[in-house]
Image: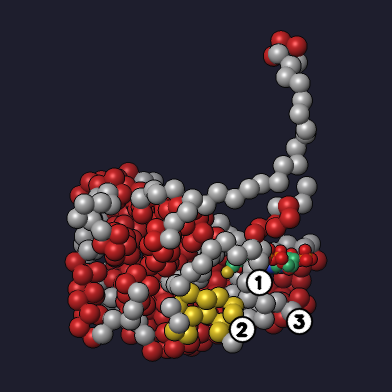
Amino acid sequence: MTSGGRSGGLAGVVVGETQVSTVGQEGHGLTYRGYSIEDLSSQSTFEEVAYLLIHDELPDASQLADYKAELVSMRALPPALKTVLEQIPADAHPMDVLRTGCSALGTMEPEGGERSQTWVADRITSSLASMLLYWYHYTRDGNRIDETAGGDTIAEHFLTLLGQAAPSELTRRALDSSLILYAEHEFNASTFTARIVTSTLADQHSAIVAGIGALRGPLHGGANEAAMELQSAHATPDAAEEAVMGMLGRRELVMGFGHRVYRDFDPRSAVIQEWARQLSEDRESMQLYEKALRIDQVMKREKNMFTNLDFYSAVAYHHMGIPTDMFTPVFVIARASGWSAHVFEQRATNRLIRPAGEYTGPMERDYVPIEDR
Ligand code: COA
């Protein structure tokens, strides 16, 4: 049995056209609707990027102000959704909370009628942090927080709800930048999943819930959590190096390295590494960064492999005070905009996605009645 037959993992297979983003094209590491990730992450804000993805063009100043106000107005959760969130165990994985919360929202506010697809996209993008952190505080200490608090950006909303205090400027800017980096990435596994669901003419909540499910695994979004576990498991850079050498000797995957499309480097990685360094310096706590740096050097030296976005995101998120099991949920909050852009695009050009499999099982066999087996 091969790992997936002729086109194992669909590597290199073009499965559709898109105008949302390019990944790994020569000369352009990553672009969203033609804008480079370097320009967007250094000059833009997450709300501008979400608007670009969901509404097709960068907003002007007044459109951005209106958009931010709209997102703020969409933070409040329906009381029935709060009741659902209160029933989820405190030890549930936060990805499961978002998957369940988004699904429940879809039962209370189904798409259609006055709820256009852009309204649903904005509503989901805006309320994911509300869901996650309402559940988090309620199940930890019974505190029914005000889920609408926290400035006028998604980054500030998330950080304020998490820490129940206004975040520092550095933390807010770093999270905002990382949300831009995570917002969109062409036909990755979760986006393709969302497009497949959309291709059956299913609703948007179903597509996003499916995307969350696909993102959860450590080969995709869950890699940032797994990278943190490795970085924090060892006391010193030397110990981390020894552990990684052992993993390579056993041919184990080191999470946060490698990529299906990028061959030389992940253009998002340098940006997040710089935030990770700045946050570590600001916290006067370089230990985690130094261990990460050593693992990075070892992987380069031994396997000529490069970090992907998830590797230094772990260091950055840790120093933002984000619990490890919320790293991938932050990715969801960012990626909801990219998934939505692909849902719209799939709808506009839809044909049911239904590939073919190569059968490798037994050829025709005679049926044996159950009593004779
Ligand atoms: N650590 C160690 N070795 C790795 C590796 C990693 N993170 N990623 C790939 N390799 C190795 C593979 O084992 C394979 O070795 P082999 O040829 O000796 O069998 C070789 O590099 C080629 O990898 P391949 O399996 O073709 O990569 P892929 O395109 O199928 O998978 C990923 C891409 C991202 C799934 C893979 O690199 C991976 O699992 N990375 C870790 C998870 C991660 O960080 N995911 C987030 C992606 S943004």
Residue at the disc numbered 3: 301
Q: Is mark 1 within 8 Å of ligand 1?
A: yes
- Give yes or no for contact between labels 2 and 3 (Cβ–Cβ under 8 Å): no
- Left or right of 140? Residue 261 is right
- Left or right of 287? Residue 191 is left
Residue 189: where, in percent of width, then height? 55, 60
Q: Mark 1 falls on what kind of element?
A: loop
Q: CA distance from mark 2 to mark 3?
A: 25 Å
Q: CA distance from mark 1 to mark 2?
A: 18 Å
User: Residue at point 75% right, 37% down?
Assistant: 361
- Residue 258 is labelled as 1
User: Residue at point 66% right, 71% down?
Assistant: 258
Q: Is residue 86 above or below residue 323?
A: above
The amino acid marked with disc number 3 is Arg
Residue 106 in sight: yes
Label 3 or label 1, whichever lies nearer to me, is 1
Q: Residue 155's image quarter?
A: bottom left
Badge 1 or badge 2: first in the primary sequence = 2
- Left or right of 373? Residue 119 is left
Crowdedness of circle 1 by 10 Å Cα count: few (<14), some, many (20+)? Answer: many
Badge 2 or badge 3: first in the primary sequence = 2
Q: Quadrant of ligand 1?
A: bottom right
Q: Is residue 59 above or below residue 97?
A: below
Q: Mark 3 falls on what kind of element?
A: helix
Residue at the disc numbered 2: 26
Residue 156 in sight: no
- Give yes or no for contact between labels 3 and 1 (Cβ–Cβ under 8 Å): no
Badge 3 or badge 1: first in the primary sequence = 1
Residue 287: where, in percent of width, then height? 57, 80
Q: Residue 106 or 57: which is nearer the viewer?
A: 57
